[in-house]
Image (cartoon, helix red, strand yellow):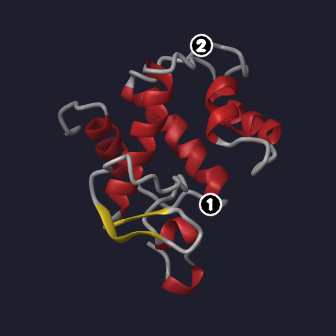
């Protein structure tokens, strides 16, 4: 982890995907208070925040039927808050896919790469160990923790 003075908001909140707080969603590991002064979730540790980010992305893919980077990011990072086109382009470059290519976010490797791309775009860097992201993704998918 970084020095506290160098940490970005998402890192300080243990919410590197910058999920907005919604009292109707009972995320595992929400901190007290559950949101910061900007309405973003606060988690007790990085693993819970990464798990929530992975779970949120997976639900958008599995439940809502949004299968492509473009469909997911259009909802995840709406144009009223983000340069959505640039966000989509960044995630596509990181994943090595076209914006309209269907993804298998039920695959923990692909979901982990997607989460890492989101973290990097949101925070401007990725300071999280691959093993931590893999554990968070496995937990989000209700899979056994990787060895």
Near-viewer residue (121 or 62): 62
Is residue 144 or residue 39 the one in the foreground? 39
Q: Residue 84 at what x, y percent from top left?
A: 77, 40
Q: Which residue is nearer to you in this view: 125 or 75?
A: 75
User: At which x and y percent is residue 123?
Assistant: 62, 60
Query: In which quadrant is the C terminus drawn?
Result: top left
Q: Label 2, label 1: how many angstroms apart (C-alpha)? A: 26 Å
Left or right of 71: which side holds 48?
A: left
Determine the secondary structure under disc 2: loop
What residue is drawn where x is 46% and y is 60%?
A: 15
Q: In this rendering, does residue 128 appear at all?
A: yes
Does residue 113 appear to the left or right of 80 in the view shown? left
Q: Residues within 10 Å of mark 1 (few under 14, many from 20)?
A: some
Quadrant housing the N terminus: bottom left
Residue 130 in view: no
Using the image, determine if residue 99 lies above or below residue 128.
above
The percent position of residue 122, horizontal first and vertical second, equals 63, 55
Residue picked out by circle 1: 123
Percent across and percent down for residue 22 are 45, 52
The residue under label 2 is: 102
Q: Residue furthest front?
A: 24
Q: Quadrant of residue 99?
A: top right
Give the secondary structure at mark 1: helix
Residue, x 22% and y 30% (percent of image)?
A: 143
Residue at 57% from the left image edge and 71% from the top image edge: 9
2 or 1: tag closer to the N-terminus: 2
Disc 2 to disc 1: CB gap under 8 Å: no
Question: Seen in the image, is 11 located left or right of residue 46?
Answer: right
């Amino acid at each position: 982890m970084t020095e506290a003075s160098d940490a970005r908001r998402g890192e300080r909140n243990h919410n590197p995907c910058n999920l907005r707080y919604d009292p109707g969603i009972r995320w595992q590991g929400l901190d007290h208070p559950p949101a910061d002064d900007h309405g973003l979730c606060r988690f007790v540790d990085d693993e819970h925040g990464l798990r929530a980010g992975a779970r949120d992305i997976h639900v958008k893919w599995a439940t809502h039927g949004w299968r492509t980077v473009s469909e997911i990011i259009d909802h995840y990072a709406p144009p009223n808050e983000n340069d959505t086109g640039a966000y989509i382009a960044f995630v596509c470059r990181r994943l090595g896919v076209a914006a309209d290519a269907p993804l298998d976010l039920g695959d923990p490797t692909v979901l982990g790469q997607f989460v890492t791309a989101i973290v990097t775009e949101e925070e401007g860097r990725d300071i999280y160990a691959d093993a931590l992201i893999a554990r968070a993704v496995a937990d989000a998918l209700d899979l056994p923790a990787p060895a």
